Image: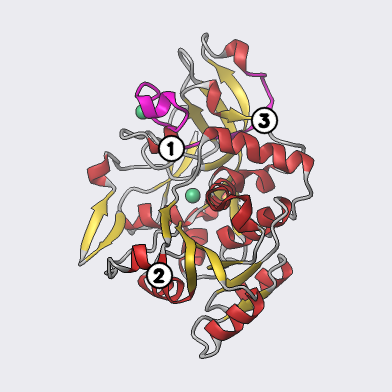
Amino acid sequence: MKSLALTQYRGALECIETTTPTPTGSEVLLRVKACGVCHTDLHIWDGGYDMGSGKMMKMADRGQTLPHTMGHEIVGEVLAAGPDAEKFVEMSRTYLVYPWMGCGECSTCKAGDEHLCPTPQYLGVLRPGGYSDHVMIKHPRYLIDIPAIPAEQAAPYACSGLTAYSALKKLGAGRRNKPILIVGAGGLGLMCLSLLKALGGSGAIVADIDADKRDAAIVAGAMLALDPRDNDFAARTREAAKDGIHAIIDFVGSPASWDLSMAILAKGGTYVMVGLYGGERTLPLATMPLRAITLSGSFVGSRRELIELMGLLRTNKVDWMPIVKRPLETAYETLSDLKHGRIVGRAVLVPS
Ligand SMILES: [Zn+2]
Ligand SMILES: [Zn+2]
């Protein structure tokens, strides 16, 4: 099998050939049909996450070894299954992969929250992922049925779709019935706009510093898309929302996006941070009770939520996000384009 692997942090990805593995036990081997390129991959490429004060959470300390094959938004076709998986999968069938695998044994995993397992085994992060023509899945429960949509449209739902869906669910239906503020109109922000509409939400105002992304947000159904650096940003946002901003989903997660959010969130409001830009901020503690705000972190979503999301796709009209289809061999260039903000929508790698 051929994989575009990270052999050195911050280096160009290298095309490596290895023997295609044979599934044993409960394993399932897929032929990759599409794999999304996510911002998380940039953090992996970088070697870790910025934890503020010059500190970094290193991927190597989390158990990642090089060479590593990234890619966690995978759609693939079943090629072979181990003896314990055979009766649970259909050969040649195309599935979306739930990549946020846990140990499968702890109480968190048993409760269905594998994505929050203290000893994660995330596909494409800690196990070999989908920047490849083949991928091995450790159990058939991670294979999710998808509606009849192209593989490259379905792939981003494993991370960006699931992340946006889980963040919207954390707001609850009550909060979604008033205009919300979405910070960041990259792939996740656009996905969030389409899912908000499908969930019957009343709409969103979008903040992004990039004019092309603001245009894409308007096309995706935003009520208003503004540059947060504009002096009248807060006034125009409040005017559009009429009753103030009671819910914010921050897909950037930077000191600047935090400052912007804290300045505009109404009393009693909910702020959900999803973005992993990193850095640090202090918070006057008395503002928590005095403003009665809820601050919530959201990391991808559960397998149950991904199944729910596929159900939503089947029953409600969901606007497809713009997809930039690229050959697998261009993984490194695609990653660079993402890093420099040159991708509008979601880039998806397709093996030839
Ligand atoms: Zn676990
Ligand atoms: Zn991702």
Q: Which residue is mark 2?
A: 258
Sequence-wise, the earlier of marks 2 and 1 is 1
Mark 3 against mark 2, which lies toward the viewer? Answer: 2
Mark 2 against mark 1, which lies toward the viewer? Answer: 2
Q: At x 56% / y 40%, what residue is drawn?
A: 74
Q: Are marks 3 and 1 in contact (CB under 8 Å)?
A: no
Q: Which residue is mark 1?
A: 115
Q: Please report the bounds of the magenta region as a residue range.
A: 89-113
Indicate yes or no: mark 1 CB to ligand 1 under 8 Å. no
Mark 3 against mark 1, which lies toward the viewer? Answer: 1
In three-dimensional space, the C-alpha distance between marks 3 and 1, rounded to whole angstroms, equals: 19 Å
Q: Which is more toward the observer, 187 or 339?
A: 187
Instruction: Please name the amino acid that badge 2 sits on.
Output: Trp
Indicate the quadrant containing the C terminus: top left, top right, bottom left or bottom right.
top right
244 lies above or below 47: below
Q: Which residue is mark 3?
A: 145
